Amino acid sequence: MGKVDVGPARKIKTNGNYAYIVNSGLSIFDISNPKIPFESAAISTPGDAQDVFISNKFAYIADGTNGLVIVDISNPKDPFTVGKLDVSGNALSVYSQGRYAYVGAGIRLIVTDVSNPQEPKKVSEIALSGAVKGLYAQDRYVYVACDDAGLVVIDMMDASNPKQVGTIDTAGRALAVKVAGKYAYVADEGNGLLVIDISNPQNLSQVGRFDTVSKAYDVYLEGSTAYVASGDRGLYILDISNPSNITRISLVDTPGNALSVCVQNKYVYITDETNGIVVVDISKPMQPKIVHDSPWINEIRFATF
């Protein structure tokens, strides 16, 4: 047993009956009853965990100066670290697809072979013009939310030789990106939510925007709806059926600072920074209802290494 210092709730991913939250480590919450989530396990990481991606039975953690950490979550009640890779920088973001994990470390995008999670190996890297804050992979392309450099598209046809094929500068700071069809949706901090046409990666164009008033930190897509974590404004629920004319369905104010969002089975899970995890019932999208709001416990707790 060891101790883990619980920091602000930063990013969240859900998988089945569990939610995975990065603070200064990784906390795993049982959400089988969304109205009463509880922490079933926690694992300390040597660095300062910034992002997490769940794939199969593994959690991939961007662990700040500690690089990439791979955690076996086949039993979410008993997670354990199985692999680690030093990225020689500050790991801020991570996304896994197939045999590869993509890690944003400062302004570098690092391609890692994780086919053997116990021995992840660096395959290649590419330097970009801004910090790699958010990642999304689809087919041969990796879409990068590149901070003040906007949205960048990387061709990964040859993982050993990634190539930048497209970029579009945005008015804000690109912090997160999700892709649906021929559009990329970018949380552009103070500039709100942007819609970028990516049908031609070499000629990206902005086709839509929604002003979140406050900062847009993260976005999650489900069908014709976008969910945006918007800091002190809370959660925006948006109709994106017409990407060039996004309209607001509703807005839920959360007590803290909404930083990350994930949707599963008519519930939205939000990391609300020092306020911890907030769960919102969206069975009636025009009348969303907070069903769980429990302040984060900022103290030393025991966790499994």
Image (tube, helix red, strand yellow):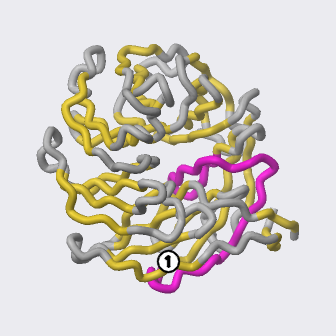
For the residue pair 291 and 209, the one nearer the viewer reads as 209
Point out residue 205 in the picture as x, y percentages from the top left corner: 24, 23
Q: Amino acid at mark 1?
A: Ile
Q: Residue at x 35, y 21 (%)?
A: 168
Left or right of 152 in this view: 72: right
Q: Which residues are magenta?
A: 32-61
The percent position of residue 36, horizontal first and vertical second, equals 51, 85
User: For the point 79% across and 67% down, which residue is it?
Assistant: 304
- Up the image or down, 184 lies above or below 48; here it is above
Q: Nearer the viewer, residue 207 or 17?
A: 207
The residue tagged 1 is 31
Name the secondary structure under disc 1: loop
**Residue 54 lies in the magenta stretch:** yes
The mark total stands at 1
Give percent across and percent down for residue 267: 36, 72
**Quick one: 182 or 239, which is closer to the camera?**
239
User: In the rendered image, which quarter contains the N terminus?
Assistant: bottom right
Quadrant in which residue 187 is drawn = top left
Q: Please give left or right for residue 107 compared with residue 278 in the image.
A: right
Q: How many C-alpha atoms fall within 10 Å of the one at disc 1: few (<14), some, or many (≥20)?
A: many
Percent position of residue 2, x then y: 87, 67
Say if the magenta span includes residue 137: no
Q: Residue at x 30, y 52 (%)?
A: 221
